[in-house]
């Protein structure tokens, strides 16, 4: 396993403590390679203390520990019904996140403003307005110059 950052190394200590509290049947459902990876990568200097009298959900865990335990439970210990529930919950959470992004970035109206601006530009372009530039012909300029000379 690659170098693991310090928070995860501490989280592995907490995960190991929880795994050691599992009954043998549940513990054996987790592959040995996963358990060895947890043990090999945990922070040997970090001590996790928990109160055995408290339920697991009342233990004070790091967020990384919660994530690891969630994934271990979902992958190795959960029943089919629980897995289905987790998938539905994750799907609902993702949908909620996407809705928040839509509200935050207002993606529905993003192109409406551009459409309105394009309509204004097209309206101006469709008007038959031409800019006329008055140009005197070369002969007329010469004729005017000659006239001005004779007037003097």
Image (spheres, rainbow, N blue to C red):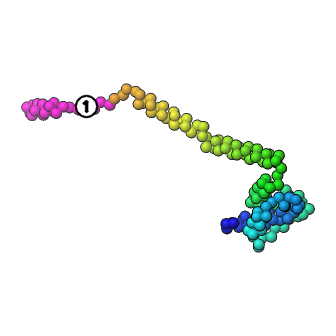
User: Where does the image place residue 43, in percent across and percent down from the top left?
Assistant: 75, 70
In the image, residue 133 lies in the stretch drawn in magenta: yes
User: Where does the image place residue 132, in percent across and percent down from the top left?
Assistant: 29, 30
Which segment is the magenta one? 131-152
In the image, residue 39 lies in the stretch drawn in magenta: no
Residue matched to label 1? 134
What secondary structure is the stretch in magenta mostly built from?
Answer: helix
Q: Secondary structure at mark 1?
A: loop
Quadrant into which the C terminus falls: top left
**Can you name the residue that lies furthest to the top here?**
128
Quadrant into which the N terminus falls: bottom right
Give residue 3's quadrant in the image: bottom right
Tell me the residue at 76%/46% (across/down): 87
Mark 1 Cα-neighbour bin, 10 Å: few <14, some 14–19, many ≥20 = few
Asked if one can make out residue 148 in the rendered structure from this viewpoint, the answer is no
Asked if one can make out residue 3 in the rendered structure from this viewpoint, the answer is yes
Tell me the residue at 49%/35% (across/down): 117
Given residues 73 and 50, the one toward you in this image is 73
Tell me the residue at 23%/32% (across/down): 135
- Name above or below for residue 1 compared with residue 58: below
Give residue 45's quadrant in the image: bottom right
User: Where does the image place residue 127, in percent across and percent down from the top left?
Assistant: 40, 27
């Amino acid at each position: 396993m690659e170098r693991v950052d310090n928070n995860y190394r501490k989280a592995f200590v907490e995960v190991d403590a929880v795994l050691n509290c599992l009954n043998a049947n549940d513990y054996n459902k987790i592959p040995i390679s996963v358990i060895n990876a947890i043990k090999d990568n945990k922070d040997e200097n970090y001590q996790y203390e928990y109160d055995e009298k408290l339920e697991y959900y009342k233990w004070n865990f790091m967020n990384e520990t919660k994530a690891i335990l969630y994934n271990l439970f979902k992958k190795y210990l959960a029943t089919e019904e629980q897995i289905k529930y987790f998938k539905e919950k994750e799907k609902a959470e993702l949908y909620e996140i996407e809705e928040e992004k839509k509200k935050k970035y207002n993606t529905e109206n993003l192109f409406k403003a551009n459409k309105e601006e394009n309509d204004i530009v097209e309206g101006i372009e469709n008007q038959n307005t031409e800019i006329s530039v008055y140009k005197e012909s070369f002969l007329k300029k010469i004729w005017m110059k000659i006239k001005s000379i004779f007037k003097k």
